[in-house]
Amino acid sequence: MSRFAPRTTPALAPEEAAALGRALTAQDVSVFANGTAHRLAPEADAAVKDLLARLARGESVTVSSAEPLLTVAQAAELAGVSHTYVRKLTDLGTWPVEYRGSHRRIRREDVLAWLAGQKGSRKGGPAVGED
């Protein structure tokens, strides 16, 4: 599940793909933003090189983000609640859920936002709907 739509880039023209392929034979690939060279973290460097290599082979490329999703057990542990209560929160729509087959997956960000809201509501008394 991603907040941003995937973006597809068509294949490069053969001469552009060949030039990119030649450039990728260098050991160091530099990224420039606003005229400043940046060294990428190893994971980002590998992802960028993979993307460029695919374009150099004449492939079209789709880029998408992937947010890590939690299982019910992981969400319950993070929130300090039971698995049953997590299922109730997803059934009520309190926590958005994505299904992988019959398995629920929950964004960490949604659990943390709910926890922050619970802490805020406890200042004036117990939160509604808690176990």
Image: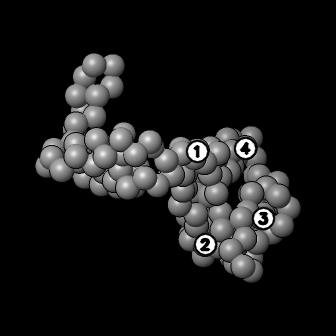
Residue under label 1: 7
* Distance (Cα) linking label 1 and label 4: 40 Å
Q: Percent x, y for residue 119? A: 64, 46
Q: Which residue is mark 4?
A: 121
Q: Is residue 15 visible?
A: yes
Element type at mark 2: loop
Mark 1: few/some/many CA within 10 Å (<14, 14-19, 20+): few
The location of residue 4, given as percent across then percent down, is 62, 44
Question: Please, what secondary structure does the residue beneath circle 4 have?
Answer: helix
* Corner quadrant of residue 100: bottom right
Q: Nearer the viewer, mark 3 or mark 4?
A: 3
Is residue 76 in view?
A: no
Give the quarter of the figure containing the C terminus.
Answer: bottom right
Of label 1 and label 4, which has the lower sequence position? Answer: 1
Residue on which the image places disc 2: 71
The secondary structure type at the circle numbered 3 is helix
Between label 2 and label 4, give the one nearer the viewer: 2
Instruction: Tell me what residue is drawn at x 54 percent, y 45 percent.
Output: 10
Q: How far is disc 2 from disc 4 in space, using C-alphas?
A: 26 Å
Identify the residue at horizontal 76%, vertical 72% (top origin): 87
Task: Give the residue number, with chain letter if any, for mark 3.
Answer: 90
Residue 97 is left or right of residue 31, and the answer is right
Residue 48 spot, x, y in % from top left: 35, 48
**Which numbered disc covers residue 28?**
none
| Residue mark closest to the camera, 1 vs 4 | 1
Question: Dot 3 surroundings within 10 Å: few (below 14), some, or many (20 or more)?
Answer: some
